[in-house]
Image (tube, rainbow, N blue to C red):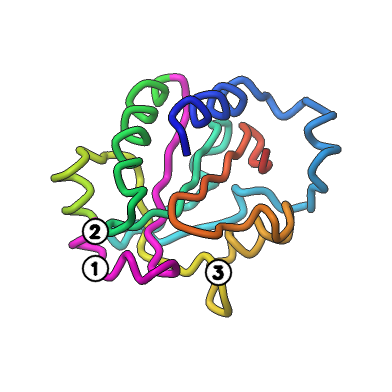
Amino acid sequence: MDKTIILAALALAVTLTGGDKAMAETAQMPSKTAYDFTFEAIDGSDLNLASFKGSPLIIVNTASRCGFTKQYKDLQQTWSDYKDQGLVVIGVPSNDFGSQEPGTEKEIAEFCEVNFGVDFPMTEKVAVKGAATHPFYAWARETLGDKNAPRWNFHKYFVDRDGNLV
């Protein structure tokens, strides 16, 4: 995804307060929000999305051996530029597309830190499609439809301050 597109979507996510009825009507909103989901962090601790209530989120499935891996640089820059305004970037390693994330959590974390200085939250490696799909990704697919489900690495979901997908 082009950095300009990321920043435009980010601007939308940062400014949304959750009261925008037109946006809520565009996506059929089930009673759940992103804040109802927990991942395991890359270090083994819980990464409960409820701990980010009130903050817009960018949740992106990642892979270390993908042609799009250089996006880590822009994601890190976006995190650095906007975290003081409340934005949270969350990387979700996945080996679902082309087996491009074969490493262990330790290897993934080291790769991201050494090559891109990543210090935004990262989850353990999870499935974002198929029978073992992480519950957040199953909910996102159900909420936004199949057309908006990840088709490759570095697919981004934007979550407003109320936990709704936008």
Front residue of 144 and 2? 2
Residue 103, label in figure: 1
Q: Amino acid at mark 3?
A: Lys
Q: Give the residue at the far front of this rendering.
A: 67
**Tag 3 or tag 2, which sits nearer the N-term?**
2
Dot 3 corresponds to which residue? 129
Q: Quadrant of the C terminus?
A: top right
Whether the residues at callouts 3 and 1 have beta carbons within 8 Å, the answer is no
Local secondary structure at mark 2: helix
Whether the residues at callouts 2 and 3 have beta carbons within 8 Å, the answer is no
Return the x and y of residue 77 as percentages of the image width and height. Answer: 32, 28
In the displayed structure image, the side of residue 57 where residue 148 appears, left or right: right
| Distance (Cα) linking label 3 and label 1 | 18 Å
Q: Amino acid at mark 2?
A: Ile
Return the x and y of residue 51 as percentages of the image width and height. Answer: 49, 43
In which quarter of the view is residue 160 placed? Answer: top right
Q: How many marks?
A: 3
Q: Is residue 95 within the magenta segment?
A: yes
**Tag 1 or tag 3, which sits nearer the N-term?**
1
In this picture, which residue range is highlighted in magenta? 85-108
Whether the residues at callouts 1 and 2 have beta carbons within 8 Å, the answer is yes
**Tag 2 or tag 1, which sits nearer the N-term?**
1
Front residue of 63 and 118? 63
Q: What crowding class fits label 2: few (fewer than 14 Cα within 10 Å), some (14-19), or many (20 or more)?
A: many
**Vertical side of 149 occupied by 6: above or below:** above
Residue 51, label in figure: none
